[in-house]
Image (tube, rainbow, N blue to C red):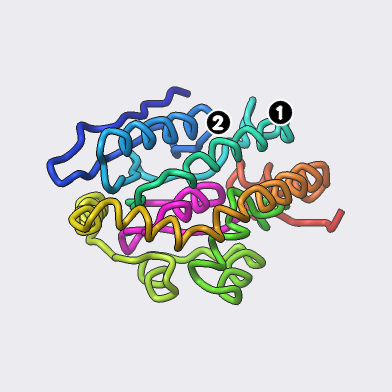
Amino acid sequence: MTVDLRMHDQLPDHVALIEWERPPHNHFDREMLARIADLGRQAQDAGARAIVLASVGKHFCAGGDFGAGGLQASPAEAISAIYAEGKRIFSLEVPLVAAVQGAAVGGGLGLACAADFRVATPSARFQANFGRLGIHQGFATTLTLPRIVGAQQAAYLMYGAHSVRGAEALAMGLVDRLADEGQERQVALALAAEIAASAPLAVRSMRATLRADLLAGLDDAFARECEEQVRLMQTADATIGIEASLAREQPQFVGR
């Protein structure tokens, strides 16, 4: 599986576009997240005032790779490394806008929620599917999902692993703008340009204030998520859930 991840030349309106392509479902690994973080740092250091995160293909991001050689191989080490790179993405200093098409599932939902804003199409699908995998939520959705949609909606999405499409996601506040099919990137770029038109030092300062509590809680959230994911990966339910997900079957959990 190859990864093509690049940053386009900065646009005249001070917006940078970072996109990735990792067929077939844009699953991430540590290297991919590290590259996103590196490109984000390069973009803001070069003067970008907002960054659009986007992917090529059918799905935005289907989360971490649970296939052969993926997260199951050495879960504690792999998850810790992923979260270290995730923290670097959260720590970027300019606003991020995620352009979401297809699925943003599991860790892919977490990546979308790391952004300040999300633009999606009506057919986009958001799912905190961790409960269907038999594991604890991850990628700081412990913090971000309640912050975005409220504690009750977050619990609803997590406990039942409910999948929501674009219009429902917009209604609950998970999505900020709904774009026509195939136009999510253009709408995200337009939103980023609106942000970039404001005074850049002021926007960075406001963002740092608004996200201070989020950043302050990241280490504890990542530590808790990693500990519980590693523990639960040793259970029969996790084996059932992950195998069912890979086989695209309905899991039948046994509670052990």
Asked if 170 appears above or below 108 in the picture, the reply is: below
Q: Quadrant of residue 154?
A: bottom right
Q: Earlier in the sequence, mark 1 or mark 2?
A: 2
Which residue is at a point 35% across and 48% down the rendered structure image?
A: 94
| Circle 1 SS class | loop
Which residue is at a point 31% across and 57% down the rendered structure image?
A: 203
State how far apart marks 1 and 2 are (Cα): 14 Å
Question: Magenta segment, which residues?
Answer: 100-129
Give whichever of 200, 95 is nearer the camera: 200
| Circle 2 SS class | helix
Which residue is at a point 77% across and 49% down the rendered structure image?
A: 228
Residue 39 belongs to magenta span: no
How would you rate the neighbour count of disc 2 (Cα within 10 Å): few for under 14, some for 14-19, many for 20 or more? some
Asked if 152 appears above or below 6 in the picture, the reply is: below
Asked if 37 appears above or below 255 in the picture, the reply is: above
Task: Tell me the amino acid under the disc marked 2.
Answer: Arg
Q: Quadrant of residue 55?
A: top left
Mark drawn on residue 30: 2
Which residue is at a point 87% across and 53% down the rendered structure image?
A: 256
Residue 111 belongs to magenta span: yes
Are the residues tagged 1 and 2 within 8 Å (C-beta)? no
Mark drawn on residue 73: 1
Q: Give the farthest residue toward the left.
A: 12
